[in-house]
Image (tube, helix red, strand yellow):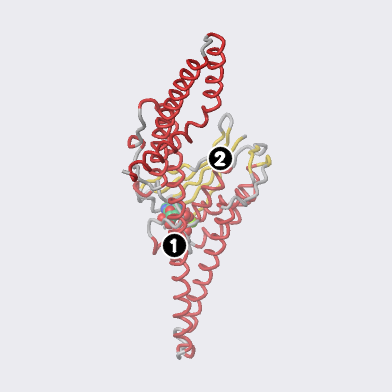
Amino acid sequence: MWVIDSKVLSEVKANLISAKVYLREVILFNISIIIILLFLIEDVSIVISLSSLIILFSFILLNLIGKKRNAELNEIKRIISGIRENLFASREDIRLSENLQSLEEEIKRMFEKTKADIDYLQKLERIRTEFIANVSHELRTPIFAIQGYIETLLSGAINDENVNKNFLEKANSHTVNLSNLLNDLIDISMIESGEMRMSYRYFRINEYLETLVHELMPIAAEKNIEMIYHPVRDNLQLFGDKNKLRQVLINLILNAIKYTEEGKVEVMIEEEAKFGRIIIRDTGIGIPEEDLSRIFERFYRVDKARSRSVGGTGLGLAIVKHIVEAHSSKVEVKSKIGEGSEFSFRLKK
Ligand SMILES: Nc1ncnc2c1ncn2[C@@H]1O[C@H](COP(=O)(O)OP(=O)(O)O)[C@@H](O)[C@H]1O
Ligand SMILES: [Mg+2]
């Protein structure tokens, strides 16, 4: 019996604490009523009885209000701790009673925001882990190869005139790959951490592209690939960061050369009303339709072995995409297997 009493008592206490916010109003109301009663009724004992009744009634009322308030608070607490403990899969699982409908919508919104934030963080974490795994894997290939050649040389091959130079050349080409990879990694981490400082200017695109294409011509010539630059009017100025665009164009032109066995690489500009569209077109191996949407991902290559053998890191197009997007533009690709590829992007006039 005592146990129940103490339970009831503690519930009443909790209810009253919860109703405390209305205490001032109730006391004021009681005092006013008692004063009015004192004026209206002369018999003090009746006033005392009536007042006691009113106070008792107020007390019961406060208890009921507190009880209701507590129930609502508990309902809200239950939902919030449910969100914290990830008990809800979707917004539909969150339900509050009728009189808390407006709050329900707010809580649902908060739930969605929190869920989106957590999903985003988890995605970032996944990307980071994947990136580290990829980097380690990419580093391992050239390092193992270099180690292998050096060990073979040390264990005697160095005196074998037939292979020693060849092994050194191979080891050297892997160090070149390694250094390309490190450079690309530095670039991509600068870009992705937001440290890439852009410096936009108007510049004469014709002169700029002509010089660049001429610089890269010997590389194409080595593979017997014809490299053609189609000039545009000399006074056409486009808006962009010359240095960063150089990186974009070198990547795109070198890709065109690397992934072309025979034929030509053409560089041109199509002048539009408000833009200049820079186009790099090749007659190379082409890119399968299903890979087109993925080639801009970090480390994505259609043919890993082929890319590596031509010194690719799989980061080039990811860097290109970032820089072009920093110019509020977008790289477009068209490609047909066995016929060639065309990469292009617009710059503001
Ligand atoms: N001009 C092109 N012709 C055919 N395939 C291309 C061309 N440019 C890019 N690719 C494909 O896209 C992949 C990603 O390119 P990129 O990011 O520059 O990496 P990589 O270092 O391998 O060149 C390449 O591995 C290649 O499979
Ligand atoms: Mg490349």
Q: Is residue 41 visible?
A: yes
Relative to 52, 198 lies left or right: right
Give the vertical position of 107 relative to 288 (above or below): above
Image marks 1 and 2: residues in contact by CB distance under 8 Å:
no
Where residue 103 appears, x then y in whole percent?
Answer: 43, 30
Give the vertical position of 235 relative to 159 (above or below): above
Q: Is residue 262 visible?
A: no
Dot 2 alpha-carbon crowd within 10 angstroms: few under 14, some 14 to 19, many 20 or more: many
Where residue 1 appears, x then y in whole percent?
Answer: 31, 43
Q: Nearer the viewer, residue 79 or 132?
A: 79
- The residue located at (49%, 43%) in the rendering is 331
Q: Nearer the viewer, residue 212 or 300?
A: 300
Q: Earlier in the sequence, mark 1 or mark 2?
A: 1
Q: Which residue has dot 1 on it?
A: 134
Give the vertical position of 45 relative to 207 (above or below): above
Judging from the image, what secondary structure is the residue with disc 2 in? strand
What is the tally of numbered marks visible in this picture?
2
Which kind of residue does numbered mark 2 sit on? Ile
Judging from the image, what secondary structure is the residue with disc 1 in? helix
Where residue 138 appears, x then y in whole percent?
Answer: 45, 66
Relative to 274, 140 lies left or right: left
- Mark 1 vs mark 2: give the one in front: 1
Q: Nearer the viewer, residue 223 or 73?
A: 73
Dot 1 alpha-carbon crowd within 10 angstroms: few under 14, some 14 to 19, many 20 or more: some
Which kind of residue does numbered mark 1 sit on? Asn
Q: Which residue has dot 2 on it?
A: 269
